[in-house]
Amino acid sequence: MSNVFDTVLLLALPASGKSEVRRFLDLQTPDACRKDFHMGPTVQLDDFPYVHLMRRVDDELEKLGHRRLFFASGAKPFIDPIDWGTLIELINEDYADLHSAKIEQPASAARHLMDRIERAGKKVGAPARLAGLDEAVAKTVAAAIEEEAAQLLKDKHNAYQPLEGKTKVIEFARGGAHGSAMPLEKPFGYQYSLGCLSEEILSRSVILYIWVTPEESRRKNQARSNPADPGSILHHGVPIEVMMNDYGCDDMDWLERNTAKAGTVTVKAHGKTFHLPIARFDNRVDKTSFLRADQKEWDAKAEADVRSAIKAAMDKLASFSS
């Protein structure tokens, strides 16, 4: 087998420590990553930037007196929850483009992004939205988000590199309303979103699940929230109504208990059945918030505890691949 994972799905409720674990791994030496965590240098994919820019589109539309298309307000969940699938389709496209090193040089990065969102939504059955905008409105919205969209496209291109020996890390959070019965109904939860992933991703992936309670997720979300930096991976806050209605629970425990193969999550997609190895990093008692600080300020014991816990999870995943 390869000595490093090809693709790791880094999954958890919001503010559970996904980005903190990702930062920890980014700061390790290549030798330590291979030896302790079975990972090569990482290439990151995340659906949060798309959520942020969809909200930015809505904010600009609202300023123009136009109805919002994705979120009823800045503090509300998706108007149409099928957009959980839209986000996965954007990840699928990014993953494919990463492997082909596809460079795009649109006249407007914002219009290019808006077109991508529209196409991705169509693939999962979302109604046409951005395509129906008046041209003057679309141009005004695009101008307002052009800088952020251009940076997102630049970051995407900058990630292109020879992939041999690298590990792709795909990060996203899914869940359902507080008190929901299991299994969660489509399009909520991991069962739906995992089933939307491309065959290429599913055939190469293992799952590292950061385990926290919904209550701890809400506590940490409030603690990390910085309204002055809403686009930040580490410091964005999720509105409380979204936390309760989209992330009040998740279905990972149900998926692990209702799998066809122990130690995996069973995903049926593309006419096939995939068994994705899964391991948990138990962060129910917070182990990771200190990782937000400068590395020089990290507590040595806390760092050792995180290293040990992540190593145990990654060793478990590696045992399935051997």
Image (tube, rainbow, N blue to C red):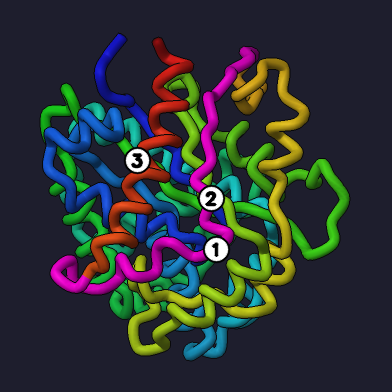
- The numbered mark at residue 282 is 2
- Secondary structure beneath label 1: loop
Kindly give the residue lying farthest to the front in the view shown.
Answer: 301
**Amino acid type indicated by mark 3:** Val
Q: Residue at x 51, y 61 (%)?
A: 16
Q: Residue at x 20, y 55 (%)?
A: 155
Residue 154 shows in this picture? yes
Q: CA distance from mark 1 to mark 2?
A: 8 Å
**Hey, which quadrant is residue 72 in on the image?**
bottom right
Q: Nearer the viewer, residue 270 or 62?
A: 270
Q: Residue furthest right?
A: 181
Q: Which mark is residue 169?
A: 3
Q: Which residues are the magenta region?
A: 271-297
- For badge 1, the amino acid type reads Val
For disc 1, the neighbor class at 10 Å (few under 14, some 14 to 19, many from 20) is few
Q: Residues within 10 Å of mark 2 (few under 14, many from 20)?
A: some
Q: Say which of 168 and 198 sits in front.
A: 168
Crowding around mark 3 (Cα neighbors within 10 Å: few <14, some 14 to 19, many 20+) is: many
- Residue 286 belongs to magenta span: yes
Above or below, comparing residue 285 to residue 2 in the picture: below
Q: Residue at x 65, y 77 (%)?
A: 76
Residue 231 x %, y %: 36, 73
Q: Position of residue 89 (x, y in %)?
A: 49, 41
Residue carrying label 1: 285
Label 1 with label 2: CB-CB less than 8 Å: yes
